[in-house]
Image (cartoon, rainbow, N blue to C red):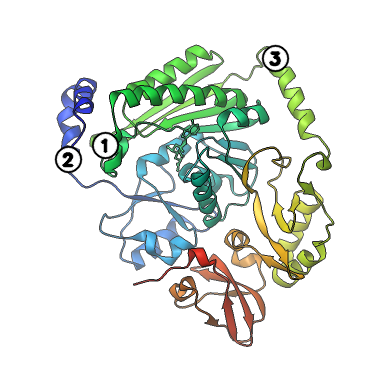
Amino acid sequence: MDLPQDFIERIKIQLGESYHDFLAEYEKERTYGLRCNPLKTDMEQLRSVLLENRIVPEKVPWADEGFYYPADTHPGKLPFHEAGAYYIQEPSAMIAVQLLEPKPGEKILDLCAAPGGKSTQIAGRMQGEGVLVANEVIAQRAKILSRNIERMGVRNAIVCNETPQRLAQRFPLYFDRIVVDAPCSGEGMFRKDIQSREEWSKEQVEVCAARQRDILEQAAAMLKPGGILVYSTCTFAPQENEQNAEWFVQRYPQFKLEKSERLWPHLHRAEGHYAARFRKKPIYEKNEKEQEARLSRQDKRPASAGKVRKEKKHVFYDLFAEFCTATLSQESQSCLREKIEAGQLAVFGEQFYLLPDGIDSPDGLKTERAGLHLGCCKKNRFEPSHALAMALRPSDVKQILEPEEPERYIRGEALCCGAQKGWTLVTVHGCSLGWGKASQGILKNHYPKGLRRSYL
Ligand code: SAM
């Protein structure tokens, strides 16, 4: 493989004798991985569905949810993938969230989040409880992030399209955990992506290292005392990894480097990643108490203070309530009712959202997705969103249809459905895939047009 000459020179010095082993890896096939989504399935079921499809998975040693899959197979084409049961992710990229150790109920920020590998892994660990703010600075990439959050059935994420600086103004000392999976020189992408090899230069490494320090500064300001920050890159350059970690603890002595991991292609059956875990001292610095008091006043503002109106009763509320009664199970209705009582319903015009618990509306921020999109009111009826379908389990609804050929549903075809009537959750291997509406023996296909595709 054609690697940049300056890169080879540096790696030679960096790795000493093992440099030959490293280079030899670049004549081999890259590694392929996927990560189970515990919001939708479990490792056992995933393994058996993959095996049914002649894909032999092997466990990734450093990530609880990770499997390798063989290079000549295509798990991304299975309907179970469309159902959000797993996420295709390079195995070493799974290390950052393993170090982050997210927990249900926490406030967590993924500052550089698109396309969503880390965010969806974090969401899986949070089990729908707490708040995940998934942020991406590039608008087009924030849309891709938002689609992945939707496919994986995440209920508790706010997807933003902001600069780290603006987020830091909104969320000082706010998060329990933050991951900064920083834009980097991408040396760990060399086997996968020819562009990353062509764009690489010594100068670019320095530019990336400086940008990473800027992003880290903002992350430092958003972490609560006692919180955990994980910094990661998919590059091997020490300037972007150990040297930045060193710079960070010097610049912010209230942070301690607890642990760091380096994954190398010649040592770990992976493309390569660096991840460092810092803990912020549980003591407030000067000004921080004051800042936190200001923040908590801000969070206690009445709902009407924001642009978004969180309402229990809205002009379209009855249509929404009618849909819930007809479609959702009793248990799921009462769970939703509790959240609405707690003020988590947000209505933007005709669009209904359920905000994650514990956060005020994300007013003032460029927001792609303000929590779980429930649906919208049109033509005097409530139409549930695809996001809601993806976040529901079969036990959450009154009616499901598990078609024998889910590919037909994904193509957009109508299906036969017997005596069912009304909104029906279509599933594959017990995982929600989308909505259909049953009438007179036919299930009208509500799989979003933009997601439909043909199968060979
Ligand atoms: N965490 C993602 C995942 O696991 O799917 C991958 C993130 S990627 C390595 C880095 C991201 O940072 C890119 O999406 C890029 O657009 C974004 N980015 C670029 N410049 C940035 C900046 N100045 N501040 C914050 N994010 C930036």
The quarter holding residue 367 reads top right
First in residue order: circle 3 vs circle 1: 1
Count neighbours of disc 3 (C-alpha within 10 A) and say few if under 14, some if 14 to 19, many if 20 or more: few
Q: Is residue 262 left or right of residue 382?
A: left
In the picture of the structure, the residue carrying the numbered disc 1 is: 197
The quarter holding residue 335 reads bottom right
Count neighbours of disc 2 (C-alpha within 10 A) and say few if under 14, some if 14 to 19, many if 20 or more: few
Q: Is residue 340 left or right of residue 411?
A: right
Q: Which residue appears at 59% of the width and 62% of the height?
A: 386
Name which residue type carries label 3. Answer: Asn
Q: Verify CB contact (< 8 Å) between mark 1 and mark 2.
A: yes
Q: Is mark 3 within 8 Å of ligand 1?
A: no
In the picture of the structure, the residue carrying the numbered disc 2 is: 1
Q: Choose mark 1 or mark 2, whichever is in front.
A: 1
Residue 111 in percent (x, y) is at 53, 35
Name which residue type carries label 2. Answer: Met
First in residue order: circle 1 vs circle 2: 2
The quarter holding residue 188 reads top left
Q: Is residue 32 left or right of residue 228?
A: left
In the picture of the structure, the residue carrying the numbered disc 3 is: 287
Residue 383 in percent (x, y) is at 68, 67
Asked whether residue 316 appears in the rendered view, the answer is: yes
Name which residue type carries label 1. Answer: Arg
Measured in 3D between alpha carbons, the distance from the residue under mark 3 to the one under mark 1, in whole angstroms, is 45 Å
Measured in 3D between alpha carbons, the distance from the residue under mark 1 to the one under mark 2, in whole angstroms, is 10 Å
Asked whether residue 271 appears in the rendered view, the answer is: no
Q: Which residue appears at 34% of the width and 26% of the height?
A: 204
Mark 2 falls on what kind of element? Answer: loop
Mark 3 falls on what kind of element? Answer: loop
Q: Verify CB contact (< 8 Å) between mark 3 and mark 1.
A: no
Measured in 3D between alpha carbons, the distance from the residue under mark 2 to the one under mark 3, in whole angstroms, is 53 Å
